[in-house]
Image (cartoon, coloured by chain):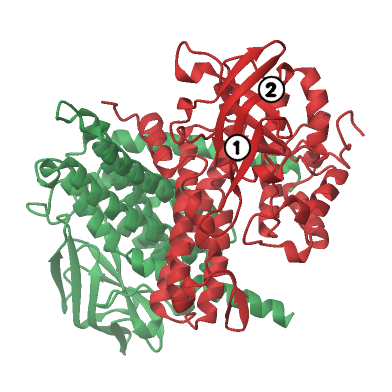
Amino acid sequence: MPEAAGAALADADSELDELLADLASVVRSVLADNPGARSATGAPPGPDRARWRRYAELGWLSLLVDAERGGAGADERAAAVVARGMGAACRREPFVAAGVMVPRCLTGLADSAPVRALLAEVTEGDTLAVLAWQSERGECDTRVVAENLPVEARPDGDGLVLSGSVSWVPTGAADAYLVAARHAGEIALVRVDRGTGGMTVAPQRAADGTHWARLDLDGVRLPGSAVLGSGTAARDALNSAIDTGTLLCAAELLGLIDRMLELTLSYLSTRRQFGRPIGSFQALRHRAVDLWVQQRLTSAALHSALRQVCSGGVGPDTLALAASSAKSRASSAALRVGNEAVQLHGAIGFTDEYELGGYVNRALVLAAWLGNARAHTRRHGRLAAEVAASAEYRRAAS
Amino acid sequence: VTSYGVAPERDWNALGNEEFRALVRSDFEQHYPAHLRYPSRRLLWSEQDDWYLRMARKGWIAPSWPVEFGGMGLAPAKLLIFLEEQERWGIARFQDHGIRMIGPVLIRYGTPAQQRRLLPPILRCEQRYCQGYSEPEAGSDLAGLRTTATPDGADWVVEGTKIWTTMAHDVTHMFLLARTGSVGAKQAQISFFLLDLATPGVTIRKIRDMAGEEELCEVFLDRVRIPGDNLVGAVNQGWTVAKSVLGFERIHVGSPALPTSGLRLLEQVAGARGLADDTAFTDQIAGLRLDVAHLTAVYEEFAVRLERGEELGPDVSMLKLWATETFQRIADLVIEVAGPAGGSAGAVELGGELVPVLSAYYRAKPSTIYGGSSEVQRNIIAKQVLKLPSA
């Protein structure tokens, strides 16, 4: 690259950095009224809709939608700033599930009136929609293909009938579910609204007070217009949405790490025992350093992944590798920081009266969602080997 | 020819980064002797002098020095590329403290006369330096060093013992810290000297390490005379001089090179032992690869800061911590997957190849001790980055 072009790029970078810093400060101030994290009990059944609409007004639900489709035309770096802020404030609205994955999936589908309609409802905050594709095993070690899907769609006149059970749906309080179904050997993405006959939503309490849901679909009849996409376009849109969600879930986990570390360092500096701050004891200082190292690693892993994903012309392998790399680190780091933060606080850290426990509970949920550290480490290893082998094959063939 | 050495073939910084990388890579690949790649121990000067004398003649011996002092004058990004390519091709380092530390020290703190006298022989590799910092009673607490230097006429008379001086027996000179004062902070009583190891009163004892190599030395200084013009910087300013040259060095010691070399050995041993498809193993190595990938990601962030001309802060200590501790985890896994060969000294035949199974272990073991132990790095971060309270 000629130096002049490099300099221009550097300028563009610093301009972007400024925009992202501005966004981060807006996110902080909007979320500053955070009532604080609280535990698994006594949480409301779903997100506060007024707050969700506020996020929509701020453009946070359309960051990944281009300007021609009425979105903010930003990229994953901006979404990561919001997700990290959500984590730091321990907000439990499904920003990544409903505000990132669904818009990303819909914009990957062929344009049609039903797709446009749902995209508008979702980005304006009127409809809370989430994707539903996992079986009870919750596998994430391969990309999603039709034969792995737990729901089947059969043709029925002009419409179709859905049957099966789909698990690990991130909220049972959604207005609409975007169900991925097997349909004549391909993937069909089907909109199923809450209250549709034949669908039962079975909630499962999550550690942070939110609810997962299992959707039991027993001969759910839907018109043809409920099918938002099918075939390879639907498959690619779904996988891209899942990997993008995985990457941004890592950003949200980093936000949790930020705050847990901040709380712990402040506690070590102020809590006194044996006549001195406990943060003056070398055994504890060294443990605090190791937590900070995990934060730096997570931040570097995330930003490196974001740079790769945002560098343009990125294929599915690059996105998947970047997502697994970041999610693996963020999941293991968040749990490690959470566990150590509780121990370094002592008994107060285990209470529901102090905010740390809520962060740890949230970390448990997000570390497990979309594949935990072990699952993504394994997936990264396999994918990297596949990519290397195919590069080898191409070299040998040419 | 500049007044100091060979004039550069061209303005390296005018090249694009990738163009520069390709040029350096092709030179190394064409000219570096194959039998010296990835050595499992430090090589003696006599084993690799051909290569480094060629680099000296080519004007590539001092990539970081300014052009006017006989270096390549590389900007930070180019310098990192140069070092990365050396590491990628498995090029052995010689005991190059003269190039890496003394040159920059003299350029910053030396008098013009010192620069003219001392830089050219370093560029020609005639004078090669080891580092005389640690002492038997001053390891992690370096400022507590006891070696003294007392003025005597135009000279200084040095008395004391230095230890853990790597390759002292294979170099010509040593830079050392000695106590020259007795008031104020311990750090403000120390001066920085250059010593010709052929001076009477210098005795070098080799220390055999647990790998069976003799790379470390103890150096006894018995009323050794150092000429006054071999004092660098002002009297009692040695601590500042010693610290000032660590800037670039601190990022380099945390580069992904060592753990990456460990991964290479791990793959080789696992392949030979038929573990390439063993899930327990593939999960472990996938995790270690991510540990190295994320080290690289942090390393690149520091490199970008250098590139922007920023001074690196104490947070750079995390690079050494994570690089060396990751390297040790990799080396430990090599031993585990090697099975019975995990106890074999030297190269052992595995899957039809000779594999130095313990080489990573023996390189990893001291890496968390030298250059400021892991415990010292954690102390630095706790105090200077996290600002945790002292008692």
Q: Which chain is red?
A: B
Q: Which mark is residue A220?
A: none
> What count of labels does the image hold?
2
Identify the hue of chain A.
green
Which chain does tag 1 point to?
Answer: B
> Residue B205 or A373: which is nearer the viewer?
B205
The quadrant of the image that shows the C terminus of chain B is top left
Instruction: Give the residue at x 50% y 61%.
Output: B361
Which residue position is annotated with label 2? B225
In the rendered image, which quarter contains the N terminus of chain B? top right
Q: Is residue A368 above or below residue B71?
A: below
Q: Amino acid at mark 1?
A: Val
| Residue A257, above or below A270 | below
Regarding mark 1 in the picture, which secondary structure is present there? strand
Is residue B252 in view? Answer: yes
Q: Is residue B344 left or right of residue B122?
A: left
Q: Residue at x 9, y 45 (%)?
A: A351
Q: CA distance from mark 2 to mark 1?
A: 15 Å
Residue sitting nearer the eye, A116 or A378? A378
Q: Which structural element holds mark 2?
A: strand
Q: Nearer the viewer, residue B219 or B239?
A: B219
Label 2 close to label 1 by CB (< 8 Å): no
Q: In the image, which disc is placed on residue B219?
A: 1
Q: Position of residue A307 (x, y in %)?
A: 53, 51
User: Do we see residue B70 in this rendering?
Assistant: no
